Image (spheres, coloured by chain):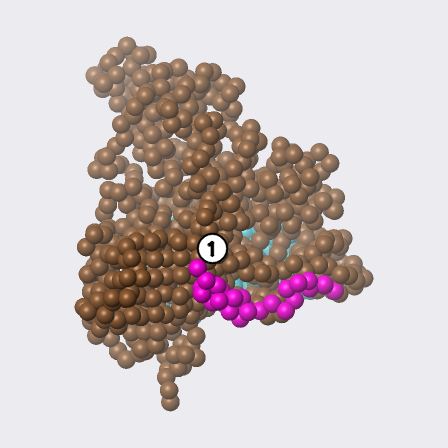
Chain colours: A brown, B cyan
Amino acid sequence: MALNHATSRPADPEQAGSVYQLSRRRFLQVAAAAGGGLMLSLRLPCADNAAEAADSSEFVPNAFIRIGGDGRIILTMPYVEMGQGTYTAIPMLIAEELEVGLHQITLEHAPPDERLYANPLLGVQATGNSNAIRAAWQPLRQAGATARLMLVEAAARRWGVDLASCQAQAGEVHHSPTGRRNTYGELAADAARMPVPENVVLKRPGEFRLIGTPAKRLDTPAKVNGTAVYGIDARPPGVRIATLAQSPVFGGRLKSVDDTAAMAVAGVRQIVRLDDAVAVVADHMGAAKKGLAALSIEWDDGPHAALDTDAIMAELERATLRSGAVAQDTGDVTQAMASAASRIEASYQLPFLAHATMEPMNCTVDVRPDGCEIWVGTQALARVQAAAASTAGLPLDKVVVHNHLIGGGFGRRLEADGVARAVQIARQVAGPVKVVWTREEDIQHDMYRPAWFDRISAGLDGKGRPVAWNNRFAGSSVIARWLPPAFNNGLDPDTTEGAIDLAYDLPNVHVEYVRVEPPGIPTAFWRSVGPSHNVFVTESFMDELAAAAGQDPVAYRLALLDRAPRAKAVLALAADKADWGQPLPDRTGRGVSLQSVFATYLAQVAEVEVSKDGEVRVRRVVCAVDCGIVVNPDTVRAQIQSAVIFGITAALHGAITLKDGRVEQANFDTYEMLRMNEAPMIDVHIIQSAEPPGGMGEAGTSAIVPAVTNAIHAATGKRLRRLPVDPAVLKQPA
Amino acid sequence: MTFMIKVNGNMHNVEVEGDTPLLWVLRDVLGMTGTKFGCGMALCGACTVHVDGAATRSCVTPVDSIGNSEITTIEAIGATALGARVQKAWLDREVVQCGYCQSGQIMSAMAFLAGNPRPTDADIDDAMSGNICRCGTYLRIREAIKQAAESI
Ligand code: FES
Ligand code: FES
């Protein structure tokens, strides 16, 4: 399969022949493609959100499959490749039912197109929340099957033979009795005139030929020879390079800037002043950085000049003393707590986290009087286009966005702040300008995973079983800002995911969320957003309950999972494969955790070693997963390996702190990443399942964190209720 | 100032200040964008190139320090036997995720393998721990390096 980062729009279905309606659900239309082929237009849900569910009856397609007269099959889809294998798994779904090889499909990025996205619902054209495969699973297979049936029908009519005697295989239709065969390309124009089948029968899992096989990633070759083009690699003719300093305190303003020395730097062309930032435009990034360092800037720090993280945490802690929105209320917690044999309570804290995508924030913009062109890698194309249009003061149809490969998304590139900023700068620059953030700027002006404070308690019966579970937590709601329609009655589906509807058999549960938006620090999605917080708290606390009951953490959990067979199975499998219960040396321990989020069940066992100085080394991680039908097993493995490293990085190193309103971390020396010498062995065991696919891009990140802290408890007896892990607490007394 | 530098066998005249990091000469002046920017402080390895075969962080290498040395970048390594083997191992082992760090990973791995064709895991960890991968592809990088080593 070829990858094609085309920005041209797909053939317009309105211009071509007649349009058929497949079903009342209006997710698919079939038409003749311009140039004599078959064109299927689809509506794929792009984010699990309320706004999408409330979508109107108007059919606005966002994905297209064209089978050309030349036999080429081109898929244009709204999802972007961020490293999670979407570019490979999505075509598999079509190829499976269409009966073609994976290599026969060419993939194009969907352009943001004002005629296709006339009213871009915020969040619709976005890749996040591990949703790509889940959303595409049914519609793409149906589209593939529909096209196949129409091609077969076209062949049967052409040859005057019985439909049932024709067979589709490898991009051709065969009629074995007569030995006739036509390629899909030869049949495509005729197929477009066939009636659209009302009902298509999809393959059962046992019949899959491609799905579930470890297909090679299709986006890889260009990434090992330097030819892959990321947003930061865009070079429109005449482009200048800019880098910037934004107010070090969020909400501050630029007071004055002396640019005499900066303008004297060879290669520096222009200084751009904004209300809250300065940019240096130059011939190359070397000159731009040197120019930036030569500026003397005075800031008005504004209202958050004295802000620090301790004050924010104290505010969150206080907030958990007032009542919040009730996210779950099952049974009678008050009553059950009162009659419990014993009660346990604890509080937990999680820090702000930066994304630190390997590719720093960047965006290239050319603002002309008649329009604006953008080169960027984004997870949210339509959102970016809207932000650029409003910043440039242009109508949406005057903004062209060229999307690119993304050097790490993790939620950072669901935001349009970097694009808006680049447009502000570009408005003052003649010709195209590429705005590249330094790593320091990238970390200090991120939009951060929220910090959290949780107050949680449980009542146990005489046998140590939890009979009451009461959890109240406070922090920012990203959804409330990013997708307001999905924030209702003080709640949103992300913030509570992993805190409510636990797999465990808990008769009395009460969970409340208190929304507190911290001042002076913006928050955003971050790989496994709500669960990255909630799973740490619930799985740490479950471990505390097991300890209080004097029971083994795995056995304790298993006893609560009779009604959740998929959860029970992954837990039992992970424990077994991890040699749970086998003796380990001193200051070494195993910890377990279990989660069911993003429709995926995952259990992890981490084995850690804690040095005398309190340094933690994760030696081995065993993971068992049931993510429904697996489209590409190697991608599932890769995603879990990736998520585990990401989660350990957060557990051991991750914290963004503010002092005097300023982010204290700046580069990889102060905001550390796990490196190869710290990477554990990771074994992934996938449970065969016939359930619909769950999300995999994010799931593994959450479960690893409590697995590590629970293992630290097993190794040292120290219970860590605050992230990241603090080696000082774990030092062995002399 | 004008500097003559040799990149992937070709001579280029570049008109920049002598303290300009090689990274920006490659990316912004010569338009060779395979070499990536990650940190600018020799902390991540994304910008790794070979200077006379040695893995070098181009973000902290001033262009006036290059002299007559030969620079090799990710764009050219496929032409060497070792480079092709490393690339193949990377594909066979499905190392890559977002891919942004991988130019640097491959350049570091190649320089390392050239000097140590029979590495242990500990050798690999030592040699590669200067290269960050935010997507966490470390285990596969280790496997790919071993595969490339075995095929030498
Ligand atoms: S960019 Fe040179 S080491 Fe990070
Ligand atoms: S593959 Fe994404 S940073 Fe390494």
Check residue A304 for magenta coloring: yes
In the rendered image, the residue lying farthest to the top is: A160
Q: Nearer the viewer, residue A627 or B137?
A: A627
Left or right of residue B115, residue A517 in this image = right
Amino acid beneath label 1: Trp
Residue B110: image x %, image y %? 45, 60
Question: On the rendered image, what quadrant is the C terminus of chain B found in?
Answer: bottom left
Residue B142: image x %, image y %? 37, 61
Highlighted range, magenta: A298-323
Displayed quadrant of residue A339: bottom left
In the rendered image, the residue lying farthest to the right is: A260
Left or right of residue B83, residue A212 in this image = left
Check residue B148 for magenta coloring: no
Residue A358: image x %, image y %? 51, 57
In the rendered image, the residue lying farthest to the bottom is: A734
Name the element at disc 1.
Answer: loop
Judge whether residue B67 can be spotted in this image: no
Q: Nearer the viewer, residue A266 or A624?
A: A624
Q: Nearer the viewer, residue A468 or B130?
A: A468
Left or right of residue A392, residue A143 in this image = left
* Residue marked by disc 1: A526
Assign ligand 1 to one image quadrant.
bottom right
Chain of the residue under label 1: A
Residue at (31, 50) in percent of width and height? A600
Left or right of residue A134, residue B65 in this image = right
Judge whether residue A712 can be spotted in this image: yes
Question: On the rendered image, what quadrant is the N terminus of chain B found in?
Answer: bottom right
Displayed quadrant of residue A29: top left
Residue at (27, 50) in percent of width and height? A626
